[in-house]
Amino acid sequence: MSIVAIVAHPDDADIFCGGTLAKHADRGDDVTIVHMTRGELGTADGDEAEIAAVREEEARRSGDELGATVEFLDFLDGRVTYSMENRLEIVETIRRHDPELVLTHYRDDMHPDHRVTSRLVTDAYYMTSLPLVETASPPCDPSNVYYFGKPTSSFEPETFVDVSEHVERKLRAVEAHESQVAWLDDHGGIDGEFDDLVENVRARARSLGQRAGVPFAEGFTSLHTTSVAYLE
């Protein structure tokens, strides 16, 4: 199986679905994390180029921890916009990987980059199989899109993945984003849920695990609802 997670920023995949990605990688699945941006507005420790270089390196270390390939598109942090041109770039990105599953942000989110990424991926998904929509790669037909989201939004997970055996790797992957962890510890998240980032990520996984009847879990909703041990 091939899975592509398309996320707005470095650390998004680790926070929201890192355990699931590690679990699939351990099963032998091909896992790729595609970052829309390099998170260059995520701290104030340097100019945008310097911050982008740091966060890209952190994301690559995090991907190694999860067993995932890491890629970057060239959208600008805080400035991801919706357009047909950008939608077609995501169509090409999905086609280039030809995944069975796509993971991305839920549509309701305080961060504008998360909201726009969700819409771009969702709309691109419907175009990836259309032969008359021409991009560099041939059409493909992923079977589903799974969404992860924040507890501060209207996101309500329907599918839970038991990540009890992978939660420590998930947390190590989050900790690989040293600059972002330090920044959030000092300044807090934009909507407050990621103050003390690592422990709050652990607490969220524990809370979802309680709902699923396991020690730790990650939650998703999907375009095509299903309930499985792995994301199928």
Image (cartoon, rainbow, N blue to C red):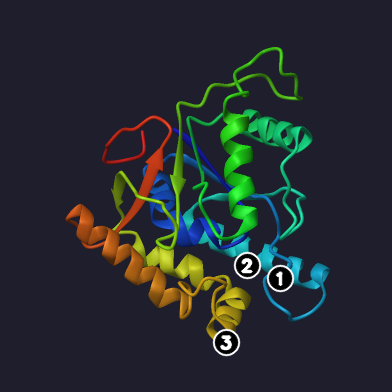
From the viewer's perspective, is 14 left or right of 54? left
Residue 25 in picture, x, y percent from top left: 43, 46
User: Which residue: 62% across, 46% down?
Assistant: 117
Q: Secondary structure at mark 3?
A: helix
User: Which residue: 61% across, 80% down?
Assistant: 183
Residue 173 in picture, x, y percent from top left: 49, 65
Q: Nearer the viewer, mark 1 or mark 3?
A: 3
From the viewer's perspective, is 184 left or right of 100? right
Q: Secondary structure at mark 1?
A: helix
Q: Nearer the viewer, residue 154 or 60?
A: 154
Q: Would you say the residues marked 2 and 1 are in contact, meaning their CB atoms lie under 8 Å apart?
A: yes
From the viewer's perspective, is 194 left or right of 57? left
Q: Would you say the residues marked 2 and 3 are in contact, meaning their CB atoms lie under 8 Å apart?
A: no
The residue lying furthest to the top in this view is 132
Instruction: Say which quadrant the C terminus sits in.
Output: top left
Which numbered dot is residue 58?
A: 2
Q: Nearer the viewer, mark 2 or mark 3?
A: 3
Label 1: few (<14), some (14–19) or many (≥20) C-alpha neighbours in 10 Å: many
Q: Where does label 3 land, which residue? A: 186
Disc 1 from disc 3: Cα separation: 18 Å
* Relative to 57, residue 117 above or below: above
